[in-house]
Amino acid sequence: MADHWTENESTLSESTKNISRAVKTLIEELEATMFYQQRVDVTNDAELREIMAHNRDEEIEHACMTLEWLRRNMEGWDKELRTYLFSEGSLLEVEGQADAPEAGAAGSESLNIGSLK
């Protein structure tokens, strides 16, 4: 299968080409995970279900390895994964906390000086 580039391949940096390959691979691994999960749900043969569950788990491993490569090699992934991955509670609340200005930062409504009593 040929890679499909959004822009003229000859104008892309090698780094961008590698990132594109990784993102495409991640998409494919996630799709494979979904397909195996659906087949696990509908298969009535226990041995086949175990094999497909094993294959699904292998695809999850591949997706995680690719995601880690992206975290290490593409700007933005590290910050966002550190914000959301393994967080607790509502992801929208986590987002709100991540987007909130830091206490005492420029633009913050608090002077952060504590009680005046």
Image: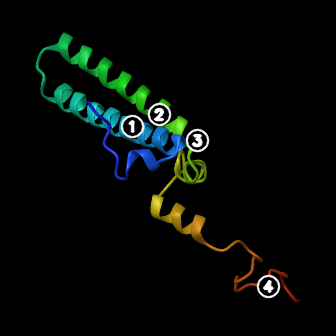
Question: In the rendered image, which residue does mark 3 sit on?
Answer: 73
Alpha carbon of mark 4 to alpha carbon of mark 1: how far?
45 Å
Marks 1 & 2, CB-CB < 8 Å contact:
yes
Q: Label for residue 97? A: none
Is residue 76 positioned above or below 68 on the image?
Answer: below
Q: In which quarter of the image is the C terminus?
A: bottom right
Query: Which residue is farthest right?
Result: 117
Q: Distance between the residues labelled 3 and 1?
A: 14 Å
Q: Which mark, by number, is residue 111?
A: 4
What whole-number distance in Å separates the C-alpha atoms at marks 3 and 2? 10 Å
Apparent side of residue 90 relative to residue 73 in the rendered image (left or right)? left
Residue ranking furthest to the bottom: 117
Three-letter code for the amino acid on which mark 1 is drawn: Leu
Q: Mark 3: few, some, or many residues within 10 Å (few <14, many ≥20)?
A: some
Report how far apart the C-alphas of labels 1 and 2 lie in the structure. Answer: 6 Å
Image spot of residue 25 (x, y percent) = 37, 34
Horizontal side of residue 116 vs 28, given as left or right: right
Q: How far apart are marks 4 and 3 (CA)?
A: 38 Å
Residue found 74% across the figure and 84% down from its top: 110
Q: Which of marks 4 and 2 is nearer the N terminus?
A: 2
User: Residue at 25% across / 14% down in the picture?
Assistant: 51
Q: How crowded is mark 1: few (under 14 residues within 10 Å), some or many (20 or more)?
A: many
Q: Do the residues labelled 4 and 2 touch (CB within 8 Å)?
A: no
Provide the secondary structure element on which disc 3 rests: helix
The numbered mark, 1 or 2, whose residue comes first in the sequence reads: 1
Question: Of the numbered discs in the image, which one, if any, rests on residue 66?
Answer: 2
